[in-house]
Amino acid sequence: MSAQETDSKVNNLGTTPAAPNAVAPLTGPSLALRQALSAACRQDETEFTKYLTTRNAETFATLTAGARVAGEPLEPGDLVR
């Protein structure tokens, strides 16, 4: 039986199997993580903070502008209190 014949068959649940390379749409936590990482990579603080917990958002707000930039290590003076 060829791969095309196998793909066109209906499985025992009465549904057609998904294509082997098909990617399921992201929802819930997976979508939130993708959106948060995307915002972080774009350095979009407004969008990024939408995905933080309350405590993390409060801490993020205390960081200096330089400390909020992706890729720069935190220094002891980066937290503004």
Image: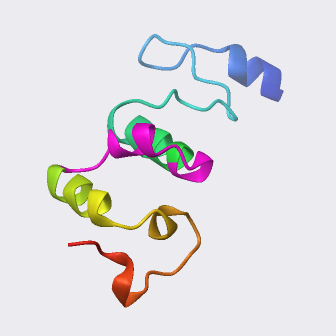
| Residue 46 picture location, percent across and down | 41, 39
Q: Is 22 inside the magenta-drawn segment?
A: no
Instruction: Please name the colour scheme applied to the rendered image.
Output: rainbow
User: In the rendered image, which quarter contains the C terminus?
Assistant: bottom left
Which quarter of the figure has residue 51? top left
Front-most of residues 26 and 51? 51
- The magenta region covers 40-53
Question: On screen, 17 above or below 75?
Answer: above
| Residue 80 picture location, percent across and down | 28, 72
Front-most of residues 30 and 5? 30
Residue at left offset 56%, top offset 50%? 43
Residue at left offset 24%, top offset 63%? 59
Residue at left offset 60%, top offset 32%? 23
- Left or right: 29, with 65 as reference point: left
| Residue 56 picture location, percent across and down | 23, 59
User: In the rendered image, which quarter contains the N terminus?
Assistant: top right
Residue at left offset 44%, top offset 81%? 74
| Residue 9 picture location, percent across and down | 64, 15
Q: Is 52 inside the magenta-drawn segment?
A: yes
